[in-house]
């Protein structure tokens, strides 16, 4: 294993994450179920502006408006078991599902979901389109996806004037292959793949820590199996995310990001990359505006009490619409 992979700076603490989540398994869920109403009632104590913000997000993640009974294939909460293959998903679900009765049922699609399920289901990711109502988003696999930069000490002007990409590239990811074919070796780009496979060996390069990547003005955020996992930390930094219009979204609400406002938009065929990078190199004030807007978007995910309440409200709404239980509205 490369030493760089052991660097935890600007990364979530996995040891602490697993310690806390294993510890949670020792506390009987009945203790938390008694606290559900109290937790949900915290919404009433918020001012009207904050309530509107939370309701917008609840109804964004969970777009169910009518009651939808589930089929007999639905799984009881009590039947979901801790398995190695879904460990982080299980932990992230249990953190909030423990507040609900174990006999409530649902569909839980763990992993990278790129389709809309037939029945209302909890997912980490979903396609961005008008017909994704059955995909109810929860904040899953957050130890990997929700990493933010606490303090980027390098200003945009001080960073290297190149586009950086360090990531895995698989044969099943034509969008990443296409980019490397087009721009590997370009003077404006420092890009390469970090995994060894049958693809062009010239693309292979050394890994870089997040801290090292922060030395570049532009960071490529290309979707892989679903969303671009680096987008969250890039948008919290003083670098700018560069990407085509996203096709998938998570708890980060990629679907509401505005092109050339939160990130630099490039065409799906990447043909305008050089033009767009040069524009923002020549117009640093416009680049700084994008960084400011990106930070504003990120800020709404950084209040842990709000995130906790939101997660409970999204799950609560799901069970009310699918199980008809007498939970708190």
Image (cartoon, helix red, strand yellow):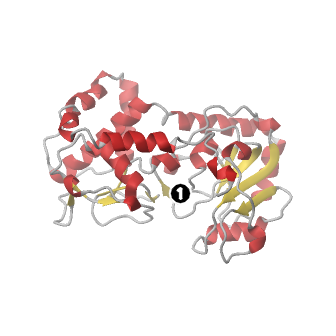
Question: Which quadrant holds the C terminus?
Answer: top left
Residue 209: x %, y % from top left = 68, 48
Residue 249 appears in the rendering: yes
Question: Which quadrant holds the N terminus?
Answer: bottom right
Horizontal arrangement in the rendering, residue 37 relative to residue 1 (left or right): left
Name which residue lies at 36% across and 35% down: 308
Front residue of 194/153: it is 194
111 to 285, vertically: above or below: below
Quick one: which residue is furthest to the bottom in this view? Answer: 198
Q: According to the image, label 1 marks what residue?
A: 227
Name which residue lies at 21% across and 50% down: 321
Name which residue lies at 21% across and 57% down: 79
Quadrant hosting residue 87: bottom left
Horizontal arrangement in the rendering, residue 275 relative to residue 243 (left or right): right
Front residue of 268/311: it is 311
Residue 196: x %, y % from top left = 67, 70
Name which residue lies at 76% across and 53% down: 163
212 to 133, vertically: above or below: above
Secondary structure type for disc 1: loop
Residue 252: x %, y % from top left = 49, 46
């Amino acid at each position: 294993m490369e030493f760089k992979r052991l660097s935890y700076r600007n990364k979530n603490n996995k040891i602490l994450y697993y310690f806390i989540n294993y510890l949670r398994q020792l506390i009987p869920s009945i203790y938390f179920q008694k606290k559900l109403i109290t937790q949900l009632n915290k919404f009433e104590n918020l001012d009207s502006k904050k309530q509107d913000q939370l309701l917008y997000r609840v109804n964004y993640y969970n777009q169910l408006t009518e009651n939808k009974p589930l089929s007999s294939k639905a799984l009881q909460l009590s039947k979901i078991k801790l398995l190695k293959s879904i460990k982080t998903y299980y932990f992230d679900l249990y953190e909030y599902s423990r507040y609900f009765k174990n006999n409530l049922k649902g569909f839980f699609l763990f992993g990278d979901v790129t389709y809309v399920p037939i029945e209302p289901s909890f997912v980490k990711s979903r396609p961005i389109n008008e017909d994704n109502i059955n995909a109810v988003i929860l904040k899953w696999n957050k130890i990997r996806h929700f990493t933010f930069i606490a303090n980027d000490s390098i200003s945009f002007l001080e960073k290297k004037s190149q586009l950086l990409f360090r990531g895995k590239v698989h044969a099943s990811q034509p969008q990443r292959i296409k980019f490397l074919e087009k721009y590997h070796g370009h003077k404006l780009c420092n890009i390469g793949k970090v995994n060894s496979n049958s693809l062009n060996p010239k693309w292979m390069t050394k890994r870089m820590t997040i801290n090292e990547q922060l030395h570049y003005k532009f960071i490529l955020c290309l979707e892989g199996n679903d969303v671009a996992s680096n987008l969250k930390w890039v948008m919290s930094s003083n670098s700018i995310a560069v990407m085509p219009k996203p096709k998938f979204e998570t708890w980060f609400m990629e679907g509401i990001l505005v092109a050339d406002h939160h990130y630099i938009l490039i065409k799906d065929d990447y043909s305008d990359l050089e033009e767009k990078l040069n524009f923002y190199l020549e117009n640093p004030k416009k680049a700084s505006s994008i960084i400011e807007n990106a930070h504003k978007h990120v800020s709404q995910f950084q209040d842990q009490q709000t995130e906790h309440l939101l997660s409970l409200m999204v799950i609560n709404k799901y069970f009310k619409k699918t199980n008809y239980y007498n939970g708190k509205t």
